[in-house]
Amino acid sequence: MRFEGQAVNQTALDNVEHWRPQKTQLLTQLLIDAQRREDVVTGVLELGVYKGWFLSLLAGCVDGLDVPVIGVDAFIGNDGKKLTSKDQRETEGRIHEAIAAVTGKPSRATIMNARTDELNVDMLRSLAPLGLSFIGVDTAWPGSSTADRLVDLAIVSAMLSERGIALFNDLFAAHLPGSCEGFFTYFFRHPEADVVPFATVATGVLLCRRAAYDFYYATCVEILQRPEGDFSELSDAARHLAFHRSISWTPQLLGRAVVPFL
Ligand SMILES: C[S@@+](CC[C@H](N)C(=O)[O-])C[C@H]1O[C@@H](n2cnc3c(N)ncnc32)[C@H](O)[C@@H]1O
């Protein structure tokens, strides 16, 4: 199996202010590439869009497929306060511009100006009736709370498609401890949840449905077992995987083996 990664306009993407590392981008491209080959792409959603870096990446990854691209943001500044209406409108315009620059086509994304606890899941279902095959969760932010992350994970549980993937950011972020608390609180309260981890990347964790776990775990291992040097961003992770195997040990999260993309 070959992993090509869906091409995006990298210069345009780099022009959007963001702070996620290159390996998060690359892994997202590789996983959506795997979904495209399996023909399971049904739509993408991001909770917490900011200036649109990750949503543009998602839009680029599903380019050419007739699937919904949805972003949700409450437009909160980094002082924890709501932006003025004018700043909200400008930010929304900039998100569409970023998507257009990255994909080379006018943006057809739906941007919802809402807090995630104001979201109506039925409305999301009407936009994405087949569920969402990739959900980015990135709402941890000054002013946000443990309870917000519970809401975000409930949306993931409700909207993730059968073969979908969710990237929950800031699980391991020292400056946003409530995000970690919210994550574990959700899974301790819902041990039966049909959402399980299969990999970690940077400060985040990748989740899928139980039935899709074997496929995505194996896909991540395969990504790391590509010939040496294919993706220099992933060489540390490949070394760790080889080392863990040499000592017959597997990193685990919530009782499942996960592939760490550190
Ligand atoms: C970390 S930034 C998102 C970064 C973005 N994903 C990117 O690729 O650059 C967090 C965003 O979440 C938004 N936000 C914070 N709390 C929220 C909530 N409860 N519901 C919706 N959006 C929220 C903020 O307005 C901010 O734009």
Image (cartoon, rainbow, N blue to C red):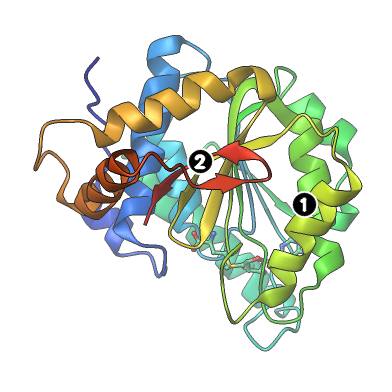
> Can residue 94 be seen?
yes
The residues bearing labels 1 and 2 have C-alpha atoms spaced at a distance of 21 Å
Quadrant of ligand 1: it is bottom right
Residue 172 in the image: state x and y as whole percent: 57, 67
Residue 89: name its quadrant: bottom right
Q: Is residue 85 left or right of residue 190?
A: left
Residue furthest out toward the bottom? 79
Q: Earlier in the sequence, mark 1 or mark 2?
A: 1
The residue located at (35%, 62%) in the rendering is 21
Between disc 1 and disc 2, the foreground one is: 2
Residue 61 in the image: state x and y as whole percent: 39, 33
The residue located at (80%, 25%) in the rendering is 126
Residue 104: name its quadrant: top left
Q: Amino acid at mark 1?
A: Asp
Residue 24 in the image: state x and y as whole percent: 39, 52
Label 1 near ligand 1 (CB < 8 Å): yes
Quadrant in which the C terminus is drawn: bottom left
**Mark 1 = which residue?**
152
Mark 1–mark 2 CB contact (< 8 Å): no
**Mark 2 = which residue?**
258
Does 74 appear above or below 134? below
Mark 2 packing: few (<14 Cα in 10 Å), some, or many (20+)?
many
Residue 128: name its quadrant: top right
